[in-house]
Image: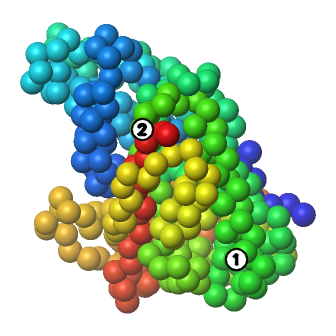
Amino acid sequence: MAMASVNVLCMNSRDRDTSYANNSSLQKNILLKTRPFLEDTIKDMLSKIFPGTCIKVADLGCASGPNTFFPAYEIMNTITRVCQQLRWESPELQVFLNDLPQNDFNTVFRSIPGFNARLKKDKGDLGGTCFIAGVPGSFYERLFPNKSMHFVHSSSSLHWLSKVPRGVENNKGNIYMSKSSSIDVFEAYSEQFRMDFSKFLRLRSEEMICGGRMLLSLVGRSITDPTSKDCCSVWDLLTKSLFDLVAKGLVQESDVDSFNLPWYNPCKEEVREIIKKEGSFNLNKMEVFEVNWDFEDNDYNKNYVFEKNKSGQNFAKIIRAATESMLNNHFGEIIINDLFTRYALHVGEHLSRERTKYTIIVVLMTMN
Ligand SMILES: C[S@@+](CC[C@H](N)C(=O)[O-])C[C@H]1O[C@@H](n2cnc3c(N)ncnc32)[C@H](O)[C@@H]1O
């Protein structure tokens, strides 16, 4: 049976209206909210690192777009500020940008000289040198040599599973867990996340030095009940849009039945339990915050006024940039414009009834 495959998971790379680079403002809002965690972690890490050490950091699930260099810039920023205050020479930084091999690394690589020039301009001679490398591969596999990394960062990526779970073949009429899904479907998704996240922690523990830090943020859900609205609404509305196309004869119902997303949004209790059970990391901090579906509705935009169609389109573009490759592969390119036109309308209607938010789980850990 054909299923959504992570082999085709890829943020939209084409330089157009629908690319991830042009539609990642929601993920940018998440990065901005976690910036204080990043700064505190780097400051604390610096105080424990031997002067002269080259600091090795990795950003896992870096994509290709304006957010790709955000963590590296913020880390350099913090390092320069702290070293200036302490009158230390800034250490060298090696940043490994990781994503799946099908990510648009060509664009990432072409952006490196511009990024270095910006650092030089902003930090002058006070900033240390930043060496950037690309690491294509799945973060559910080994990526780095033993005991080599000081800091691992990942934002808006770990809710993607390594594969569609086994046992969801009968999830008819849904593309993810939904109120009408059977208990087996909920269990299969939760179990796949447990296996994937445990493996992720074990692999990183092999790659990180003792005392190394890890900062992760992922889309979760606010309550333990997996049928909760904040878990299912995003995909229920996409399912509804697919069924609009079934009604028009543009999509076959059996194709909707056989499509399931390799995605899971855990609750914080699940994340805490897995970290504890796996045992390699000490959980220093766990926080949950929310970001609005409409990225324009954020802390920095005080003049925001809700406009149903605009909000629907804003969120539809975010979801399209992240899922088009998989939908294309399963349903064919021809339906994509229609599908997301329908989706934008459904999202707009939904948001006019309730101001829906994404729940974000942030965890900060130290390697034992
Ligand atoms: C929504 S983007 C987030 C990008 C960026 N971190 C940001 O904050 O904008 C999620 C990224 O995770 C990547 N990803 C998903 N599963 C992955 C895996 N198993 N290994 C590496 N990257 C993965 C996707 O390809 C995608 O580029």
Mark 1 sits on what residue?
186
Mark 2 sits on what residue?
213
Residue nearer the viewer, 346 or 287: 287
Residue 117, placed above or below residue 324: above
Judge: label 1 CB < 8 Å from ligand 1.
no
Residue 300, placed above or below residue 305: above
Residue nearer the viewer, 214 or 143: 214
Q: Is residue 293 left or right of residue 304?
A: right
Q: In this view, does 366 lie to the left or right of 321?
A: left
Q: Which residue is drawn at 50% across and 28% down?
A: 209
* N-term-proximal mark, 2 vs 1: 1
Horizontal and vertical percent position of residue 129: 31, 13
Residue 198 visible? The answer is: yes
Q: Which residue is drawn at 51% across and 70% down?
A: 269
Mark 2 secondary-structure assignment: strand
Horizontal and vertical percent position of residue 42: 29, 34
Residue 18 visible? The answer is: no
Horizontal and vertical percent position of residue 264: 61, 65
